[in-house]
Amino acid sequence: KKAKPTSVSFEEGSQVSYFGNYAFESCQVMRIIDMPDSLTSIGSYAFVDCFSLGTIDVPDSVTNLGKSAFHRCMSMTSISIGTGVRTMPQSLFHGDLHLESVEMRGEVDAFGALLFENFAPSEVLVLVTSEAQKQKWEQANAANSYGLNPSNIIVTSEMRTVTFKECGDRQGDVTLRVAKGCKIKEIPVTNQGYGLAGWFEDPSFEGVKWDF
């Protein structure tokens, strides 16, 4: 049997412009894909059942995303979509159970139905470029019943970086991106804390609301 690749990349100067429908179907051990800057289109179901993909960066050169392009990418936690994409197709994130954030680097004009199909996206952060884009996402969310929490649709400039310095029995810094005024949660805390006075493990802990 041939070894199955855990990562896919393209040589500098690649002329690949199109990932066809079902191009990477069931590449279940592929964890990383580095898409070429020559890419302009990603076909329908291109990454269906790529269960191990963790993060995805769609380059600015891409202008077309096909229906269900990231269907059941169950390990995907974040995706950044470039400036060329102006339409969010139907069922783009179907079954992406661990999706935490969607960063839109450009402006979206059209939204397909069932964008976040077959899972509850109420905790997903959608990062957008402007207040106008935020309003469009909020309107699309309401009109299509996506299930996003409107407070999680955030203008990127409102994001802050928070670093917890190595402290006590915790080795290494922890850096998070947090929306202004939102809660910091899921920090690995101990009774030594993370260099933050009064930061202790507590069964009732739900996160601290910060204002920057």
Image (tube, rainbow, N blue to C red):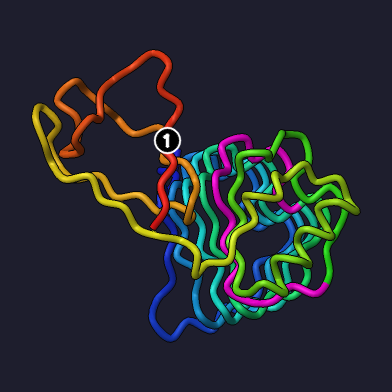
Q: Main secondary structure of the magenta part?
A: loop
Q: Nearer the viewer, residue 84 or 38?
A: 84
Pointer 1: what residue? 185
Q: Nearer the viewer, residue 96 or 151?
A: 151
Question: Measured from the top left, where is residue 125 in percent x and y?
Answer: 58, 50
Question: Measured from the top left, where is residue 36 in percent x and y?
Answer: 49, 75
Q: Residue at x 77, y 35 (%)?
A: 118
Q: Residue at x 83, y 59 (%)?
A: 140
Q: Amino acid at mark 1?
A: Lys
Residue 87 in the magenta stretch? The answer is no
Q: Residue at x 29, y 50 (%)?
A: 175
Question: Measured from the top left, where is residue 1 in percent x and y?
Answer: 45, 38
Question: Measured from the top left, where is residue 64 in percent x and y?
Answer: 73, 73
Query: Is residue 26 rendered to the left or right of residue 95?
Result: left
Q: Looking at this rendering, what residue extends furthest in the left direction?
A: 168
Query: Quadrant location of residue 95?
Result: top right
- What span is in magenta? 92-109
Query: Is residue 61 rendered to the left or right of residue 93?
Result: left
Query: Quadrant location of residue 170?
Result: top left
Q: Nearer the viewer, residue 102 or 96?
A: 102
Query: Quadrant location of residue 205?
Result: top left
Q: Residue at x 71, y 34 (%)?
A: 120
**Vertical arrangement, residue 115 with respect to residue 9, above or below:** above
